Structure formats: C-alpha cells, structure tokens
C-alpha cells in the first residue's frame, strides 16, 4: 500500500462545509509565503505575484507636454496603439484632435482619462461596460463635489463681506467698543 501523505495541504472531505474560495485562498497564501521565503533566500529569485488591488505601475505624464501622439500615449500607458483606438470607440468622452495628415493627438485630459480607464480595466479588472458605469459615477460624484465647493465659496464670500462690514462699522464708531 502506498503512502498517501504529501506536503500539500489536506483538501476537505465532501461532508465538510468549506468554500472553494477558502481552499484556493489558503493554497495561494501557502504558495505566496513559500515564494517570498525563496525570494529572500535567493537574491535572483522571481518576485511573488502582486496582490489584486495594487496598481500595475505608477504612470506619470510629462509636465511640459500638452498633446501626445498615439505612439507616445501607448508607450506611456504601456499598451498597444490599437488598444487606444478601441478605447476611443468605446468611451465617447475621449476625443483626440486629428492633424491634417490624420494623426491623432491626445490632450492631457484624454491621457488622464486613459489612465483611469487603464486602472479600471487592468488593475481593478472591470469589464468595458463596468468601466463605463464607474466613469459615469465618478463624473456625477465630481459634479456634486463641484457644487458643494461652489456653495462653500459663496458662503465664505458672504462671511468675508459681513466681516468687512463689521470692521467698517467698528472703525466708523470708535466709541461703541
């Protein structure tokens, strides 16, 4: 009779009520901890996989540039140019300018939108439709925040005006203090 023991974790029996996700997470954590231990012991070891919520890499837009050609944009975003052309068709808020020769020139606003789309699709694993909905939610949230800021500015201006009136009144009637 063969020895059935092995170093891998024991899987639950059918009558045990443990979710598959729990099992897979436990196996992933075991593999991850072994990979980290190997990486620490060997300087040339492969790095452990990145957890799901982390950004792929921080992408910075050059400060001085206002417009980007499709090749430059693709290189900055680390995607192929055809991906950007596809995103143009799916997200109508991206409107590149076209030169007389037909070359696309993306504005800084378009690039910032591309960065959000890339984050949603590649890092947060949204579908195209999910990313569209999320961007709409972000736009609505931004408009509500803008309205709130506008009301705050108006309140502060009103308060400043009232304080100026009080100061003027106090200066004109020195005996009242």
Image (cartoon, rainbow, N blue to C red):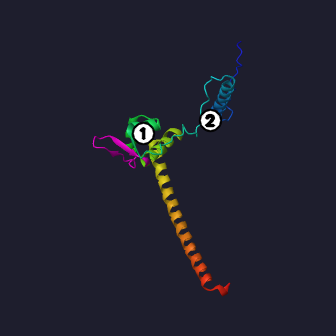
Q: Residue at x 66, y 87 (%)?
A: 175
Q: Position of residue 60 (x, y in %)?
A: 51, 42
Quadrant where the N terminus is found in the figure: top right
Is 61 placed left or right of 97 in the picture?
A: right
Q: How many marks?
A: 2
Q: Which residues are magenta?
A: 91-108
Residue 73 numbered tag: 1
Q: Position of residue 27 (x, y in %)?
A: 65, 29
Mark 2 or mark 1: which comes first in sequence?
Answer: 2
Q: Is residue 71 above or below residue 163?
A: above
Q: Residue extending furthest left?
A: 100
Tell me the residue that label 2 is attached to: 21
> Would you say residue 107 sits in the magenta stretch?
yes
Q: Residue at x 62, y 34 (%)?
A: 20
Which image quadrant for residue 98?
top left
Neighbourhood count class around disc 1 (C-alpha, 10 Å): few under 14, some 14–19, many 20 upward: many
Instruction: Give whichever of 92, 156 is nearer the camera.
Output: 156
Instruction: Give whichever of 165, 140 is nearer the camera.
Output: 165
**Measured Cα–Cα span from mark 2 to mark 1:** 38 Å
Which image quadrant for residue 177?
bottom right
Neighbourhood count class around disc 2 (C-alpha, 10 Å): few under 14, some 14–19, many 20 upward: few
Helix, strand or loop status at disc 2: helix
> Would you say residue 103 sits in the magenta stretch?
yes
Helix, strand or loop status at disc 1: helix
Magenta stretch mostly in which secondary structure? Answer: loop
Instruction: Give whichever of 1, 171 is nearer the camera.
Output: 171
Q: Is residue 75 above or below residue 66?
A: above
Q: Position of residue 47 (x, y in %)?
A: 61, 28
Q: Is residue 119 above or below residue 47?
A: below
Q: Position of residue 86 (x, y in %)?
A: 38, 39
């Amino acid at each position: 009779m063969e020895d059935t023991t092995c170093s891998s974790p024991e899987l639950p029996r059918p009558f045990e009520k443990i979710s598959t996700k729990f099992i897979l997470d436990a196996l992933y954590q075991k593999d991850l901890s072994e990979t980290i231990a190997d990486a620490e012991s060997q300087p040339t070891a492969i790095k452990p996989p990145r957890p799901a919520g982390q950004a792929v890499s921080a992408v910075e837009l050059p400060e001085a540039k206002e417009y980007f050609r499709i090749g430059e944009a693709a290189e900055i975003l680390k995607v192929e140019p055809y991906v950007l052309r596809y995103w143009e068709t799916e997200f109508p808020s991206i409107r590149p300018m076209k030169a007389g020769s037909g070359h696309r020139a993306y504005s800084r606003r378009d690039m910032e939108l591309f960065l959000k789309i890339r984050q949603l699709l590649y890092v947060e694993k949204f579908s195209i439709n999910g990313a569209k909905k999320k961007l709409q939610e972000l736009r609505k949230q931004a408009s509500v925040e803008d309205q709130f800021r506008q009301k705050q500015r108006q309140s502060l201006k009103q308060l400043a005006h009232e304080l100026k009136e009080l100061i003027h009144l106090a200066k004109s009637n020195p005996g009242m203090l």
